[in-house]
Image (tube, grey):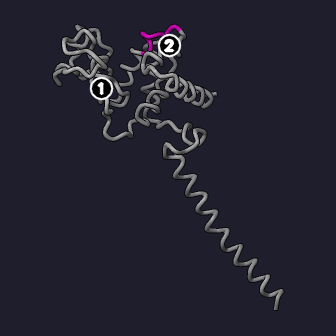
């Protein structure tokens, strides 16, 4: 009788192991799509539709495409953040402050760069050229739109290139984008991961 009980217990433990294993796999799946995941679980997947844009913008501005992918990942998790406007007023997939996008010479620009730029001026390439902004009309539709993913990525490439990345000084360019040592470390982490992907 005792032996029979022991066998039943073993079977019961075996049955209990299955739900635990399923729960473990489920947790890993959840971790891989949330920010609470370890970096090694969440860093590897770049949505393939963005790769041609990163590579074309990187070639245009003489910077590594991995740098653009890293910024896109850190800023908006590859455009999955909703809404794509930060509490400080940064806009779009690459989180540009309006004054950086349109140009700090715009008469409404001061402080942190939110400005009070009229919507029609915010996307006008002529206005951006006039005020020295970094906004780019990458898709040729006559607008440089910080909410359009192609325009935003090219604009980020323009900004990073002008701030040191084209000369190989990635740290300076990243720090100019967001003045935080932790931000620089996060971006460089993903640059490293995406560089490994290509090897």
Report the residue that reaches farthest toward the right: 3
Q: Quadrant of the C terminus?
A: top right
Mark 2 or 1: in front is 2
First-in-chain label (2 vs 1): 1
Q: Crowding at label 2, few (<14), some or many (≥20) Cα neighbours within 10 Å?
A: some
102 magenta-colored: no
Where is residue 167? Give x, y as percent.
51, 7
Q: Position of residue 47 (x, y in %)?
A: 46, 37
In the depicted structure, whether residue 31 falls above or below residue 39: below
Residue 134 found in image quarter: top left
- Nearest the eye: 97 or 192: 97
Considering depth in this image, is 75 or 128 the residue closer to the camera? 75
Does 129 sit above or below residue 154?
Answer: above
Secondary element type, mark 1: loop
| Residue at the extreme bottom | 1
- Spatial separation of the CA atoms under disc 2 and disc 1: 23 Å
Predominant secondary structure in magenta? helix
Q: Is residue 80 shown above or below 167?
A: below
Query: Is 81 on the left or on the right of 41, as rendered?
Result: left
Q: Which residues are magenta?
A: 160-167
Q: Point out which mark residue 172 bears.
A: 2
Q: Position of residue 32 (x, y in %)?
A: 54, 46
Tell me the quadrant of the picture where the N terminus can be found: bottom right
Q: Residue at x 31, y 29 (%)?
A: 88
In this view, 79 is above or below 133: below
Label annotation for residue 26: none
- The residue pinned by badge 1 equals 146
Residue 185 found in image quarter:
top right
């Amino acid at each position: 009788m005792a032996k029979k009980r022991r066998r039943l217990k073993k079977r019961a433990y075996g049955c209990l192991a299955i739900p635990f294993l399923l729960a473990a796999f489920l947790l890993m799946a959840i971790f891989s799509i949330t920010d609470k995941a370890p970096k090694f679980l969440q860093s590897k997947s770049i949505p393939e539709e963005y790769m041609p844009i990163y590579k074309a913008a990187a070639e245009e501005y003489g910077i590594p495409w991995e740098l653009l992918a890293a910024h896109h990942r850190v800023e908006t998790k590859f455009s999955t953040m909703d809404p794509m406007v930060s509490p400080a007023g940064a806009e779009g997939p690459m989180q540009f402050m309006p004054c950086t996008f349109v140009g700090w010479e715009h008469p409404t620009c001061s402080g942190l760069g939110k400005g009070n730029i009229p919507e029609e001026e915010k996307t006008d390439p002529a206005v951006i050229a006039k005020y020295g902004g970094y906004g780019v009309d990458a898709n040729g539709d006559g607008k440089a739109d910080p909410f359009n993913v192609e325009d935003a990525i090219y604009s980020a490439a323009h900004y990073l290139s002008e701030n040191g990345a084209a000369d190989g000084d990635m740290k300076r360019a990243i720090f100019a984008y967001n003045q935080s040592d932790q931000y620089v470390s996060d971006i460089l982490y993903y640059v490293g991961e995406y560089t490994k992907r290509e090897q």
